[in-house]
Image (tube, rainbow, N blue to C red):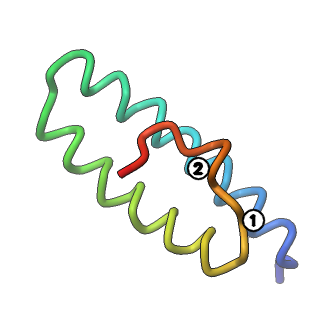
């Protein structure tokens, strides 16, 4: 079973990947893709926040 540091690391990596894809989708005006990624973004943001991670510096989307 993963410890909390591993969970945070993996979720943070996923959060950053989702943000990069969201920015690309927005740039390409792929609104359906952006909306789908936003669901993942919100879930990951909620998870990381509940684990006590301060997202101020790494949250590029700010939604």
Q: Residue at x 62, y 68 (%)?
A: 48
Given residues 27 and 33, the one toward you in this image is 27
Q: Is residue 44 above or below residue 61?
A: below
Q: Mark on residue 8?
A: 1
Q: Residue at x 54, y 38 (%)?
A: 17
Q: Secondary structure at mark 2?
A: helix
Number of numbered discs = 2
Q: Position of residue 55 (x, y in %)?
A: 63, 55
Alpha carbon of mark 1 to alpha carbon of mark 2: how far? 10 Å
Mark 2 surroundings: few (<14), some (14-19) or many (≥20) residues within 10 A: some
Residue 3 figure quarter: bottom right
Mark 1 surroundings: few (<14), some (14-19) or many (≥20) residues within 10 A: some
| Residue that label 2 marks | 14
Position of 51 with respect to 2 (left or right) is left
Q: Residue at x 35, y 35 (%)?
A: 22
Q: Position of residue 18 (x, y in %)?
A: 46, 42
């Amino acid at each position: 079973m993963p410890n909390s540091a591993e969970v945070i690391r993996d979720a943070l990596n996923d959060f950053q990947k989702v943000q990069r894809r969201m920015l690309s989708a927005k740039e390409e005006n792929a609104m359906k893709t952006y909306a789908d990624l936003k669901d993942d973004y919100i879930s990951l943001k909620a998870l990381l926040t509940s684990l006590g991670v301060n997202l101020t510096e790494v949250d590029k989307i700010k939604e």
